[in-house]
Image (tube, rainbow, N blue to C red):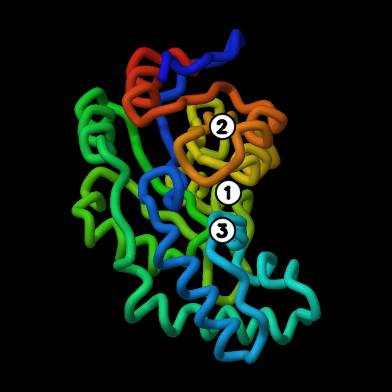
Amino acid sequence: MGPCPFLERNVPMKDVIFFDLDGTLTKSEEGIIRCVQYALRELGMPVPAKKDLFYFIGPPLVDSFLTLPGFTEAMALEATALYRKRYTAIGIFENELYPGITDLLEALDEAGFLLATASAKPEVFVRHITDHFGLTPYFREIGGASFDASRRTKSAVIAEVLNRLGLQKTKERVLMVGDTAYDVEGARKIGIDCVGVTYGYGKETELAAAHPLGLAATVEALKDGLLTHAFG
């Protein structure tokens, strides 16, 4: 594919990068979707085909389960618990890095960028995954959702990571990177820009409609754009 399109905007230099996990750093659909199917099977609910469950990747699980016919809040919470039962033991490792991710993080680290994760996945799982793939040393902060739903949305996770890093008053330095409109909108609620990657699970049309700062079609294009500050 050709170079990624960058939007023409006059923005401050970005030297802090928050990364989404699923669909941005890792190709994780096998583990996530198999765990969703397991939870539905255990509840005696209809089990959709894999192709119909990709929307579970990214947003909070409870919210995604609530989109299924007949689901109540209580059922969604029970399904989430069942999902996590399988995910903790098996699903977390049904996962792989997108090619070039380690090189991307190493290059950004060497160039002096401050890196963190900001995922709607529970933080303990985010850390297990970054540990498993040897990525944790590249990140100043591992940010994710809480189990008790007090920090469940993308915007809440981003706000928490900003707070931990002491960047609330200099958030114009921060750039979010994610693969869905959910990432773009969550970042915007906190007042930071987001670059969308179109190699992940989000639909490119939905990403573009959310008006990200720019789009990257490949990991290599993302690396080039970040290192040259083409996104800001």
Tell me where residue 137 appears, x and y as whole percent: 21, 49
Q: Is residue 93 left or right of residue 81?
A: left
- Residue type, label 3: Lys
Residue 110 image position (x, y, % from top left): 20, 28
Residue 73 left/right relative to 156: right
Which of the numbered marks, if any, corresponds to residue 191?
none
Q: For the residues marked 2 and 1, what is the alpha-carbon distance in whole angstroms?
A: 14 Å
Q: Is residue 9 above or below residue 217?
A: above
What residue is rendered at 38% in x and 61% in y?
126
Q: What is the C-alpha distance between the residues marked 3 and 2? A: 27 Å
Q: Which mark is first along the chain, 1 or 2? A: 1
On the image, numbered disc 1 is attached to which residue?
159
Q: Earlier in the sequence, mark 1 or mark 3?
A: 3
Q: Secondary structure at mark 1?
A: helix
Quarter-of-image position of residue 30: bottom left
Mark 1 burial class by Cα count in 10 Å: few <14, some 14-19, many 20+ = many
For the residues labelled 1 and 3, say whether their Cβ atoms are less than 8 Å apart: no
Q: Amino acid at mark 1?
A: Ala
Residue 194 is labelled as 2
Q: Is residue 201 left or right of residue 135?
A: right
Residue hosting label 3: 51
